[in-house]
Image (cartoon, grey):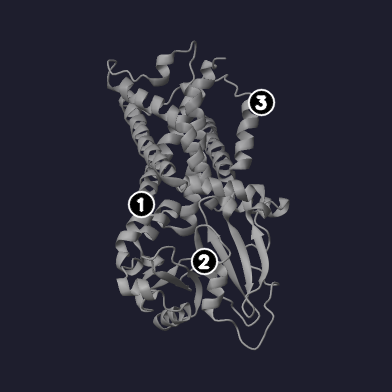
């Protein structure tokens, strides 16, 4: 099945218009996303002295000082209550104690588990990678910037769809068209082929990457959360916090060391975090971040007896939250080195493909105009395509709002022309009298 030529030109026209509008932000998102992929490598280097411990032979032999002493050292250094502890996962790793910081950012105090002394701290709000993340997610403009990023991401999906349709052959298939880049047809064709062939092969990967970023957006992400709540397909209500799961108050709470021993005996995979009780009847919350989502659990421990009061496994997490978490991890390249390198390479190649598209357009564009493809006045989009556009507008509300705005603005020019003609006509009549 081959495509309709007038529809192709209509797609082409909007592909160019949307591409020119979104290209600066798309390039910024690609480049900042690539930089953010190196977050852990950079933070490990920048905070190496605080995070990395090199124990002596005697320290290895004597082992860790108690976590109660480590907690005391972190609390004295911070001057504020400790919210959460991340346990060391190797003998060369410091324990990190989280205290309350600005908004949802993290402020960590690192403690050498062999000496019980503070080895350094991490203030996320002041870190380079936090700035990169805010630039990537909200252009350093808070809510307005988040909406702009969501708008660009929504249109970016449309760009990919229209691009695939435009790449589709008009008359016959050619295997060479799947891979070949013509180098003997002039620079415009060369850059056009780099954009078209590269864009086609990268489009599926980019759709996966973009889908993984959409849950962080304000409107689409907010709607997704509402759907999860309405369909009970998100986290269990007591996954993040369980105010009705209470400790049975006794004479004395267990030492932190004892609670951590109980936590470590649960045999959980990955990084373990232990959230502290906020009140006398509160509980310890144990959670793990593992490579596979299916291995993650949440456990609430009585602070007086150490008894497991409530346990959640990933099987209790709804399908939408499961898919959302998978997509978000794919977006950040968190499924091993292959995933990480895939996101890195695809982002860099797509940046090249986008620049190639701009160069191809500039070489084709006439000097006295925009060079947008013309579409016959009698061209009709058709009900099927209108239905698809409506569905996309509902799925991505920011795209839908922008589409309505574009239609309204496009109607202003003929309205103004009719208004000017009317004024001219009235003046002519008045002059004749």
Q: CA distance from mark 2 to mark 3?
A: 53 Å
Q: Nearer the viewer, mark 2 or mark 3?
A: 2
The residue wearing badge 1 is 38
Question: Is residue 55 left or right of 239 when viewed as pictured?
Answer: left
Q: Hey, which quadrant is residue 127 in on the image?
A: bottom left
183 or 251, which is in the foreground?
251
Q: Give neighbour class at mark 2: few <14, some 14-19, many 20+ (Cα, 10 Å).
A: many
Mark 1 Cα within 10 Å, few/some/many (few <14, many 20+)? some
- Residue underneath mark 2: 273
Classify 12 as above or below 302. above
Callout 3 touching callout 1 (CB < 8 Å): no
Q: CA distance from mark 2 to mark 1?
A: 23 Å
Q: Is residue 216 above or below residue 274?
A: above
Number of the front mark, 3 or 1 = 1
Q: What residue is shown at x 47% (from left), y 36% (from top)?
A: 205
Earlier along the polypeptide chain: callout 3 or callout 1?
1
Q: Is residue 156 above or below residue 306?
A: above
User: Which residue appears at 56% of the width and 75% of the height?
Assistant: 259
Q: Residue drawn at (37%, 58%), measured in percent from left and top?
A: 129
The percent coordinates of residue 58 (x first, y second) are 32, 75
The residue labelled by disc 3 is 383
Q: Secondary structure at mark 1?
A: loop
Using residue 184 as the reference point, say whether residue 411 is left or right of it: right
126 to the left or right of 323: left
User: Residue 170: image x %, image y %?
Assistant: 49, 14
Of the residues under marks 2 and 3, which one precedes in the sequence? 2
Q: In the rendered structure, which disc, 2 or 1, sits on the residue that comes first in sequence?
A: 1
Asked whether disc 2 touches disc 1, contact meaning CB atoms under 8 Å apart, the reply is no
Tell me if residue 217 can be seen.
no
**148 vs 242, nearest the viewer:** 242
Secondary structure beneath dot 3 equals: helix
Q: Residue 401 at x, y = what percent? A: 58, 44
């Amino acid at each position: 099945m081959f495509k309709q030529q007038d529809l192709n030109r209509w797609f082409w026209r909007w592909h160019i218009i949307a591409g020119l509008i979104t290209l600066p932000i798309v390039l910024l998102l690609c480049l900042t996303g690539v930089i953010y992929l190196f977050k852990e490598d950079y933070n490990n280097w920048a905070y190496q002295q605080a995070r990395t411990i090199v124990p002596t032979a005697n320290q290895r032999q004597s082992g860790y000082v108690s976590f109660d002493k480590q907690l005391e050292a972190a609390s004295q250094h911070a001057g504020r209550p400790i919210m959460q502890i991340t346990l060391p996962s190797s003998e060369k790793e410091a324990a990190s104690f989280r205290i309350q910081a600005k908004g949802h950012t993290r402020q960590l105090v690192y403690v050498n588990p062999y000496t019980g002394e503070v080895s350094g701290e991490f203030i996320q709000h002041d870190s380079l990678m936090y700035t990169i993340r805010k630039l990537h997610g909200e252009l350093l403009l808070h809510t307005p910037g988040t909406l702009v990023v969501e708008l660009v991401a929504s249109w970016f999906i449309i760009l990919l769809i229209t691009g695939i349709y435009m790449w589709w052959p008009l008359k016959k298939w050619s295997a060479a068209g799947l891979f070949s880049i013509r180098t003997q047809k002039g620079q415009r064709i060369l850059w056009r082929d780099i954009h078209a062939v590269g864009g086609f092969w990268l489009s599926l990967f980019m759709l996966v990457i973009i889908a993984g970023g959409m849950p962080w957006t304000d409107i689409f992400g907010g709607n997704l959360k509402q759907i999860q709540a309405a369909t009970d397909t998100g986290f269990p209500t007591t996954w993040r916090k369980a105010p009705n799961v209470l400790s049975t108050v006794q004479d004395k709470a267990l030492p932190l060391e004892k609670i951590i021993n109980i936590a470590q005996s649960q045999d959980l995979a990955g990084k373990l975090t232990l959230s502290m009780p906020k009140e006398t009847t509160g509980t310890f919350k144990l959670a793990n971040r593992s490579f596979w989502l299916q291995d993650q659990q949440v456990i609430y421990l009585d602070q007086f007896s150490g008894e497991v009061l409530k346990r959640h496994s990933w099987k209790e997490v709804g399908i939408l939250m499961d898919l959302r978490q998978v997509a978000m991890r794919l977006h950040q390249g968190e499924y091993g080195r292959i995933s990480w390198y895939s996101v890195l390479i695809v982002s860099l190649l797509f940046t090249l493909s986008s620049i190639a598209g701009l160069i191809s357009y500039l070489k084709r564009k006439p000097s006295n105009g925009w060079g947008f493809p013309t579409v016959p006045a009698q061209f009709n989009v058709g009900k099927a395509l209108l239905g698809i556009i409506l569905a996309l507008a509902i799925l991505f509300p920011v795209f839908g709002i922008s589409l309505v705005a574009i239609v309204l603005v496009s109607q202003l020019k003929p309205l103004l022309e009719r208004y000017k003609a009317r004024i001219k006509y009235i003046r002519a009549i008045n002059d004749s009298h």
